[in-house]
Image: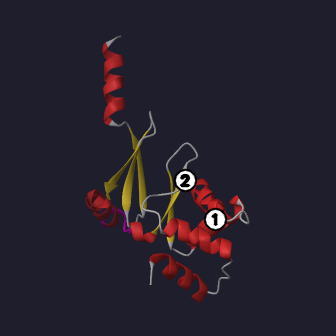
Amino acid sequence: MTHCHTLIATLRQRGYRLTPQREMVIEAIAHSEHHMTAEEVYEIVRDRTRAVNIATVYRTLDLLVEEGLASRADLGGGQEVYATVRHGAHIHLVCRQCGQVIDADAEVLDALLAQLEARYAFTCQPEHFVLYGLCTHCQSALEGSDADR
């Protein structure tokens, strides 16, 4: 069974009614190799049918997140992205200056997560972890402008 069919079957088993439009939204995000905004999902579905609106896309993505089948990350500047759980846990490094997003392996968080559990008895299970800072290019540009002063 393909990933999108597994998501659809899971929602049906949980008692959700799946319209053809909802299924197309699920297919779009399940077949994507990268994170998608709701608007990107909407454009893919609109290429297949005009019988869909952006509200349906948002409701379906919210349902996937609520049911633990997808995750949502706020990358700042009003940009939220979605991915199915197949993408696994990972970190987004977001440059505050240029907006570049670098995906990093979640294993670098292992020591921090262990400290949080030991110190605060809090078990963290991040799906998307977003850290803001400056990319190499923007750091260099900033250092260059500081030297000019």
Residue 125 visible somewhere in the drawing: no
Q: Looking at the image, which residue sits at the far top?
A: 149
Circle 1: residue type = Arg
Please tell me whether residue 45 is drawn above or below residue 1 in the rendered image: above
Please tell me whether residue 64 is drawn above or below residue 112 in the rendered image: below
Q: Which residue is mark 2?
A: 80
Please tell me whether residue 131 is drawn above or below residue 145 in the rendered image: below
User: Does dot 2 land on a helix, a strand or a loop?
Assistant: strand
Across and down, in percent, residue 31 comes to 47, 68
- At a point 41% along the width and 56% down the height, the residue shown is 129
- At a point 54% along the width and 85% down the height, the residue shown is 9
Quarter assignment of residue 110: bottom left
- Residue extent of the magenta highlight: 118-124
Chosen colour scheme = secondary structure
Q: Nearer the viewer, residue 148 or 20?
A: 20
For residue 67, side relative to residue 133 (left or right):
right
Q: Which residue is mark 1?
A: 48
Q: Nearer the viewer, residue 133 or 1?
A: 1
* Quadrant containing the N terminus in the rendered view: bottom left
Circle 2: residue type = Glu
The mark closer to the camera, 2 or 1, is: 1
Across and down, in percent, residue 72 comes to 52, 61
* Quadrant containing the C terminus in the rendered view: top left
Whether residue 122 appears in magenta in the rendering, the answer is: yes
For residue 117, side relative to residue 43 (left or right):
left
Q: Earlier in the sequence, mark 2 or mark 1?
A: 1
Mark 2–mark 1 distance (CA, rounded to whole Å): 23 Å
Please tell me whether residue 69 is drawn above or below residue 41 in the rendered image: below
Residue 142 visible somewhere in the drawing: yes
For residue 22, side relative to residue 28 (left or right):
right
Quarter assignment of residue 105: bottom left
- At a point 63% along the width and 65% down the height, the residue shown is 48
